[in-house]
Every structure is written in structure tokens, then in C-alpha cells.
Amino acid sequence: MLCHAGVSAPTPPGSSMKRSMKRSNQHFRRAVRKLPLGVASNFRYWGEGRTIYAARGKGAHLWDIDGNEYIDYRLAYGPAILGYCDPRVDAAAREGIEIGGVFALATERELSVAQRISRMVPAAELIRFSTSGTEAVMCALRVARAHTGRDSYIMVEGGYHGLCDAFQWGIEDLEEDGGGMVRPYGEGVPQPLRQLFHLVPLNDADRLESVLQQHGDEIGALLIEPILGNCCSIEAGHQYMSDVRELCNRYGVVMIVDEVKTGFRV
């Protein structure tokens, strides 16, 4: 079985069958001349000779341009909640296209969707839609800063909150006590941003409390995923999340729960 980024290619037990990658590899050699790494997102690059290119999908399955079949356990990184080619979703999409597609104006449907979300998630008292997860988290952080008057923030090590420079940081050579050198995930991220945030390990409320005791008057927000999607899907414990909520309340910190990938799916 091939498995990468939540996509696996099922093979019968004991089978020595190998996938053909001829067309994918040929396409990769052409694509890499125009697209960095031959793809439109680094997450789609699996390495030379291993990067696949999707052709179609149905339900939980998808097929690449070589005809290989895969099971997608990650829902296309989230949006394919009901699987590929779900007739209800397709019908709604066609209806939207037929009435004009996208408008630069408000519509009645915005309110009906917001009301439904609030019924499903009572904590969502007000709704603002976003075109991407990155922008949603950026706006949430900005609102938290405006509300608290504090610029600094806390992130959980291993979490993913989008491609914004403010979130592209992690610990290199992680040590047993959770320490290590904090570095940006790539070149081009301004080093002065390092002064604005703190990293804490997941499921360690004591470490979080220690950071808040030292810097609480500077911190306006805490960003956390209930499940670390880019870190082996490590789950936050129920008691830990309760502790985080209590600590944020105590220190006046806005708790930003990033469920771009987990919302309505878990």
C-alpha cells in the first residue's frame, strides 16, 4: 500500500503489483519547467518520480492520470467533506453558476448559511466568510489584537495556520524538554517577527501557564488546532482544551480555535 498525505493506494494482501507512474513522471518533467516543483502547492509535491497528478474522483476514491486508484483519507485536505462528485454538492454548484456565479455584492444566501452555522456551532455568534483558511486566521489574529490592544500571540508547536509569515515558524531539532531553535519554515520570512510570538507544546497546560505568567500582559491571542493536521494528527486532550480555555479567560487572551481542517469533519 502506498500512503502519503492521507492518500493510499489499496493493493490486495500479498500482491507484488506495482503502480505505473509513466504518464505522471512525463507530466512532472514538463510541469517542473513552468511550476516550482512541478505543482501549484508544495503539499502536492511528493518527490521526483513519486508525484501523482489527479484525473478524477468519486466518493472516497480518486484516480491519477496513469489510471491508479487511491483512497483519500484527508478529504482533499478538507473541502471534500462528502466525497468527490456528491450529487447534492454538484447540483448546488450548478445552481450557483446558473444564477450568476460570484457577485461583488451581498446576497440573501449569506444570511441563511450564517444562521445554519450558528445553529450547528452555538459559539459562532457572528459569522464572517473568508476565501481561504490563511486569510481567516489572519483576520482572527487581527481582531484579537484590536480587542486586547496586545500584539504578541502564542502558537502550538506542530500546528498549521496558513502561509502567512506570522505562522510559518517551528522548532528545529526539538529537544526532550520541548526546547530547540525556533526558525521559519523557509527563506523570506522576516526575522523581526520572531519577537512577537511564543511556541508551546500541545497537551502541556503547565508550559502554557508559565508563558502566560511571564508575558500575559503582552499576549493578545492563542492559536490552536484541536487536531494537529500536519503533525501526524495528534489530538488535544479534552482536559487540556478546558485548561487552555480557563487560562485564556484568566489572562484576557483571545482563544482562536483553528478548525479550517477539522471543522464539520471530526
Image (cartoon, grey):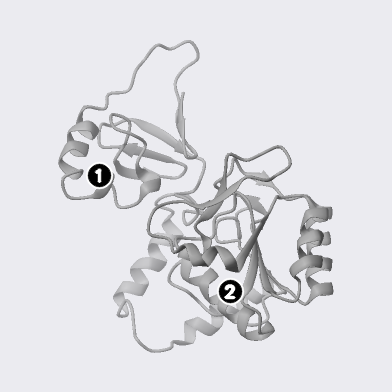
Q: Is residue 133 visible?
A: no
Is 126 left or right of 39, judged from the image as shown? right
**Nearest the eye: 86 or 241:** 241
**Disc ID at residue 8:** none
Q: Quadrant of residue 144?
A: bottom right
**Nearest the eye: 42 or 235:** 42
The CA distance from mark 1 to mark 2 is 33 Å
Q: Which amino acid, mark 2? A: Leu
Is 169 left or right of 52, judged from the image as shown? right
Where 137 falls versus 16 (above or below)? below
According to the picture, the residue beneath numbered tag 2 turns out to be: 141
SS state under label 2:
helix
Is 66 left or right of 146, judged from the image as shown? left
Name the residue rendered at 29%, 32% in the picture.
48
According to the picture, the residue beneath numbered tag 1 turns out to be: 38
Neighbor class of circle 2 (other Cα within 10 Å; few <14, some 14-19, many 20+) is many
Q: Is residue 206 visible?
A: yes
Name the residue rendered at 84%, 67% in the picture.
246
In front: mark 1 or mark 2?
2
Residue 162: image location, x then y, percent: 48, 60
Q: How many marks?
A: 2
Label 1 vs 2, first from the N-terminus: 1
Name the residue rendered at 17%, 50% in the picture.
34
SS state under label 1:
helix
Residue 236: image location, x then y, percent: 73, 50
Where 37 falls versus 197 (above or below)? above
